[in-house]
Amino acid sequence: MLKLYEKMDDKGSKRVEIVIDIEDIKNNNEKVLREIYTKYYYYSEQFILTNSGTSEDAKDIYQEAFIVFWRNVQLGNFQQQHAKSIGAYLLQVVKNKWIDILRKNKNHPMTTLVYDLPDISGTYMDTEEEKYMELVKKHYMELGEPCKTLLEKFYFKKESMQKIAQHFSWTVGSAKNNKYRCLQKLREKIKQNMR
Amino acid sequence: MNFQNITDEELELIDKFLDEKLTEGESVDFHNRWESEPDFKKKVREVRLASMAIAEAMLEVEMQKFQPQPTSFEEKRKLFSHRFRLLTIIVSLVLVVVISKIISYTKVPYNIRLYKQYFQPDPGLMTTMGNTDKYDFEKAMIEYKEGKYQSAIDAWLLLGNLDPQNDTIAYFIGAAYQAIEKMDEAQKYLYKVLENPQSVFYKDANWYLGLIAIQKNDKVAAIRYLETSENDKAQKLIEGLK
């Protein structure tokens, strides 16, 4: 959940501060993800639009940056002590990604680009891991039901096996078996693709 | 990526590890295997990547729903630039109109500008439209007041033929001609009014003859008529002529 704290600012006025619990991001709490996504979107959009980009570029780059941020949370690279810097972090990833694009396409002029943070655009994953993840994503989206929903509930929504079993009117044992079978099915598709 | 054979028990153990839900006993088992079985590390790595990729695929779907729609920066910029363009066009048009008015105004000779500045048609007389012998005169007076000067002139000319000494008719025929800028005709009828210095229209006829003289750029005549008119604005107008 988003935690709201009332703080007194320098002038003695009350100010509400939103503190994000990193665990909520780890658990893919939709409300928290949405809040973060929309809260910092315009800063990034403004940066890209004032640096030769379009609205569509802004959307694509921000989504890539958001994935980087989310992955780093999942991998434990982004921890609770960094929670107040999420906006700065996202903007820096956006800047770095956009600079790379502008460098590749030298026709775009650059203005007011500032390197004030170390390169954090990556997630310390190697190419093989990246490639594997892309294959999983591709084949997962092509999975039929109930596998797709079952895996979504378990790996994205972090629902318990009891809750998943209840949803499908299965026993917990069946739910566990089905989850295993579904993952095996997905792995088989990936294996075939990699051959 | 080397695919390992992962059993259902192994998957459950790895999932629990990734969710940080291992019991104490399971944790010991997990770490023993982690240390002693190189393939187990590969299995953990694969499940971790697969589970993250599944979640990431769903996050990408969710992000489409998160995308803010209204009033993006670019839309604001477009709106601003559209409004700015519109404002620029309006300002330019206003400037063009104002400048062309100024240019055309300054091109008009000074005497004509002065004439236009001071000339106002005589407001006419009050009409009652009673059943009297003045009916035709008053009917024409209504037309005069409605700006139908030529109709009024035609009617008054007929009445004037019947009563050539009528200074009222002569004055208003002159006034109507002046309103439609037939200055020679106007002068002709206004002169008739001057023939009778006792006429109630004597001073007004002088005023309008003074204005006609200005329009014809006859400064000397204009000053003479204006001085005789005793009109409130006469002195200022005379000063403007000097």
Image: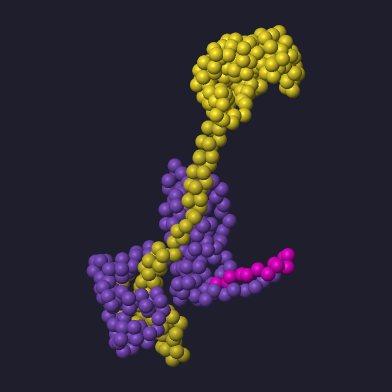
Chain colours: A purple, B yellow
Which of the 4 image quadrants contains residue B2? bottom left
Residue A39's x, y, as percent?
52, 63
Front residue (pair B31, B166): B166
Return the x and y of residue B239 as percentages of the image width and height. Answer: 75, 16
| Residue B163 rendering spot, x and y as whole percentages | 58, 14
Residue shown at the point (62%, 18%) measured from the top left: B168
Q: Is residue A17 magenta?
A: yes
Please state which of residues B194 and B159 is positioned toward the viewer in this rendering: B159
Query: Can you see residue A173?
Result: no
A127 inside magenta stretch: no
Q: Quadrant of the C terminus of chain A?
A: bottom left
- Quarter-of-image position of residue A131: bottom left
Which of the two residues, B13 or B51, is positioned nearer the viewer here?
Answer: B51
**Can residue A44 be seen?**
yes
Left or right position of B201 against A158: right
Magenta residues?
A9-20
Where is residue A148? Give x, y as percent: 31, 74
**On the image, which quarter does residue A10 sit in?**
bottom right
Which residue is most to the bottom?
A: B25
